[in-house]
Image (tube, rainbow, N blue to C red):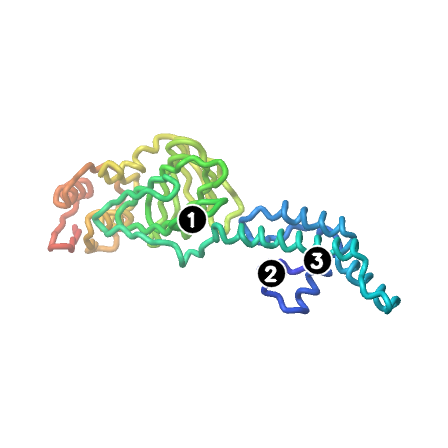
Amino acid sequence: MEIDPELLHRYWKKECTPSEIQQVERWLEAGEPNVEYGVGDDLDEDELQQELWSLLKSKKNISSAKSDVKKTQRKNISIRRPNPFLTSGIAAALVLLGLLLFIFQNRSNQNPELTIAQYKEITVPQGKKMTITLNDGTKVSLNSGSTLRYPESFSVNRRHVVLDGEAFFNVAHDLTRPFIAETARSNTRVLGTQFNLRDFVNETNSSIVVKEGKVLFSGTGCADTLILQADERAVFSENGIHKTKGQISGYIDWLENTLYFNDITLDEAALMIERWYDINIELDDPMLARLKIKGSFKQKSLQELMNDLAFLLNLHYRIDKKDVLLYK
């Protein structure tokens, strides 16, 4: 016999109608289910359910016992006092059942899982960087124009954050609570490690580089999950998910105020420069967007960076406050 998990969840929370209560109790009396039901989501319900089944079996079905009492009273109207052993057994079973439900609900209220809408949110302005420490001791360095959403206190069985942008995570080790970093395109799951995650909504992919430890990396809607170790990088895009090995330092050089362009187009580089310096870049000719750039630019002023790019790409530029024009 199967039951709707949502109905079972309402039963635990005492939100069922009388008819729904009867439906759940019939399911309980039918025996142990052969499937798992996600009651309470992150709570360890299996042990509680096993206790409940054992309790019901040991009492040979509470509802049946109640029915036996009523039948006895009907057949022996002159007997005003019911069997003390039977009623005490029923009472004890009901008390234990109530206790189990109280424990379950109490556990649920200890660390309720927040919705993302209830998370705290921090956004780093363009041209700035920021480092914060989360409730578990995890340190997160956020790049320019990035937003991190996180609960003020993590739940008992997982540590979940949502990133839009780029961040370097130094995750505090905790075997009992995996750390999950979610972006618009990917999910990263770790126990304790260091990695850089990048996923801006105005870019075309989600990427990760691992500095220490291991991570599980998967793309949203993608069946594949990659296990990445130190010095490995993975990218998820509309073309699938793939990983590479080798030098990854360039991808985290932004922590040392270094812009790193790994053979990317000028269009892609322009987005990075805009966030880095809090400016707007305009390309005079759309064909310029296809030009490729490769190199590192450490602690450069905007003027110095534009001088370098103009030289490398054989371009000219004009700066007007926060507006930059690149042209042939």
State the residue in front, 263 or 69: 69
**For the residues marked 2 and 1, what is the alpha-carbon distance in whole angstroms?**
26 Å
Identify the disc placed on residue 182.
1
Q: Amino acid at mark 2?
A: Glu
Identify the disc placed on residue 77.
none
Image quarter of the N terminus: bottom right
Q: Mark 2 or mark 1, which is nearer to you?
A: 2
Q: Residue at x 19, y 48 (%)?
A: 277
Label 3 sits on residue? 2
Q: Are marks 3 and 1 in contact (CB under 8 Å)?
A: no
Q: Are marks 2 and 1 in contact (CB under 8 Å)?
A: no
State the residue in front, 23 or 161: 23
Q: Are marks 2 and 3 in contact (CB under 8 Å)?
A: no
Query: Is residue 326 visible in the rendered structure shown here?
Result: yes
State the residue in front, 67 or 254: 67
Task: Point out residue 268 in the picture as x, y percentages from the top left corner.
Answer: 29, 48
Q: Earlier in the sequence, mark 2 or mark 1?
A: 2
Label 2 sits on residue? 6
State the residue in front, 164 or 102: 102
Q: Amino acid at mark 3?
A: Glu
Which image quarter: residue 246? top left
**For the residues marked 2 and 3, what is the alpha-carbon distance in whole angstroms?**
12 Å
| Residue situated furthest right in the rendering | 75
Question: Of helix, strand and loop, which one carries label 3?
Answer: loop
Task: Point out residue 118 in the picture as x, y percentages from the top left corner.
Answer: 40, 57
Question: Of helix, strand and loop, which one carries label 2?
Answer: helix
Question: Of helix, strand and loop, which one carries label 1?
Answer: strand
Q: Amino acid at mark 1?
A: Glu
Q: Residue at x 40, y 36 (%)?
A: 172
**For the residues marked 3 and 1, what is the alpha-carbon distance in whole angstroms?**
33 Å
Q: Taking 90 as reference, is 106 left or right?
A: left
